Amino acid sequence: MRLAEFLRLKTTEQVQLLYKNAVYSGKRRERTTIIVLYQLDGFYVEIFYLKYRWHIRHLHAFESVDLLEPYLPFVDLEELIND
């Protein structure tokens, strides 16, 4: 699936697709918002939750790896080195 196709889906369809087919890639917090990152095919989607897994505020889909920077502090490099 391409990003443009994903964006044409309804939000509920986007979320279902992410839960079923995407790869969980990380999680971070900004104040009271939990942001969960998924990778789907060649793009990324962040789900912004007001309460973790209870209320979705919005989704942010993107292709740029530059936007992954906020997740870098949470990457465990030890696992990559030992493989």
Image (cartoon, rainbow, N blue to C red):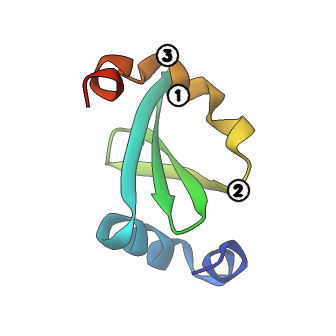
Q: Amino acid at mark 3?
A: Pro
Task: Give the image quarter of residue 63.
Answer: bottom right
Provide the residue designation for mark 3. Answer: 73
Q: Residue at x 70, y 38 (%)?
A: 67
Q: Residue at x 57, y 80 (%)?
A: 10
Badge 2 density bin: few <14, some 14–19, many ≥20, Cα 10 Å = some
Task: Give the image quarter of residue 65.
Answer: top right
Q: CA distance from mark 1 to mark 3?
A: 6 Å
Q: Amino acid at mark 2?
A: Glu
Provide the residue designation for mark 1. Answer: 71
Q: Which mark is residue 2?
A: none
Of the pair 42 and 22, the residue shown nearer to us: 42
Of the pair 52 and 72, the residue shown nearer to us: 72
Quadrant for the C terminus, please.
top left
Provide the residue designation for mark 2. Answer: 63
Q: CA distance from mark 2 to mark 1?
A: 15 Å
